[in-house]
Amino acid sequence: MLFRAAVYFAVAAAYVIVTAAGAGVGYGIGAFGDADFQASSAIWGGGLGFALTAGVLYFLREYILYVVKAGHIAVMVELLDGRPLPEGMGQIGYAKSVVAQRFGQTSVLFGIDQLVKGVVNAVTGLLQGLATLLPIPGVDQLMAALRAYLKLAAGLIDEVILAHAIRTRSDNPYASAQEALVLYGQNAKPMLINAAWLTLFVYGLSLLVFLLMLAPAAALVYLLPGAWSAGGLVFALLFAWAIKAALIEPFAIACLLQAFFKITEGQQPDPEWEQRISGASNRFQELGQRAANWAGIKTPPTATTGKVGAQA
């Protein structure tokens, strides 16, 4: 938790520092013109600093997923299953070793995560299809709101799918993701109910944090040069996001892990649900193709199958 908090608050601080630096540079350049030019230069400088930070972090998103999110899940899985960490290895070191062992490179984990998100949205869409056929006045507007909320709630599910690969000690992360998605599909109703309540909790608490952060964020903006009145809102959102990502979301993920492990205990993937998801999502089919390719790469050549293994 401390490591996660350090990363996300460093991200928020980077936004503030680079934005402030950009505003300062813009304000300095604006000194060559009148007051209006100086104010607009400060705003443009701050905006460019904000955009620069966002661009850098966009390229670091795979690393953050690999080291922070997946690593945290690895440690939580061990805790939920009551397994002690290896002797002489701390939580962060253990987390890195597990993620590297299960997923290899950051690009593999990131690719799986993106595919899983697409499939989760497809499964959510399957559950919404029937309601649109009901002859209820205003059902279209109701379903639009429900669809938006369920899409938000489904955003918490993808990390649970990754947890399944870690928990099962699978050598094929694509195959384990497929298996977990089928288990999620056949248990989607209780999982989405859990996710929906937790989403309400997460964003409700995040809104409260945002309101509490408005005052210090406004004070920070007051110190910036130029007319940056909108910055207070932006910085409050940033710090609220950091607290949500660092402290609130892990609680929701831990709850969902408990629910998923309990609901799916002893279950096997239902072939009927596998066909449904495969028909509804091309990304699920892509997971299957990558699982087959991964299995071919991992299969050592033998006297009878060496050529096939080498080709795969």
Image (cartoon, grey):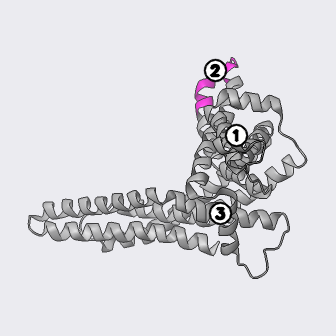
Residue 204 percent across, percent down from the top left: 61, 55
Quadrant of image for the N terminus: bottom right
Marks 1 and 3, how far apart at CA: 27 Å
Mark 3 burial class by Cα count in 10 Å: few <14, some 14-19, many 20+: some
Residue at image position (53%, 65%) is 242
Residue at image position (76%, 45%) is 180
Q: Nearer the viewer, residue 203 or 113?
A: 113
Residue situated furthest front in the rendering: 303
- Work out whether mark 1 precedes mark 3 in sequence or the reverse, and give the earlier one: 3
Instruction: Say whether residue 20 is left or right of residue 29.
Output: right
Residue situated furthest bottom in the rendering: 88
- Work out whether mark 3 precedes mark 2 in sequence or the reverse, and give the earlier one: 3
The label on residue 308 is 1
Marks 1 and 2, how far apart at CA: 59 Å
Given this view, does label 1 or label 2 mark the residue nearer the observer?
A: 1
Mark 2 burial class by Cα count in 10 Å: few <14, some 14-19, many 20+: few
Is residue 142 in the magenta section? yes
Question: What residue sits right under mark 2 in the picture?
Answer: 137
Marks 3 and 2, how far apart at CA: 52 Å
Q: Nearer the viewer, residue 49 or 64?
A: 64
Most prominent secondary structure in the magenta stretch? helix
Q: Considering the numbered disc 2 on the image, is that residue within a helix, a strand or a loop?
A: loop
Residue 120 percent across, percent down from the top left: 66, 40
Quadrant of image for the C terminus: top right
Quarter-wise, where is residue 208 in the image?
bottom right
Tag 3: amino acid? Ala
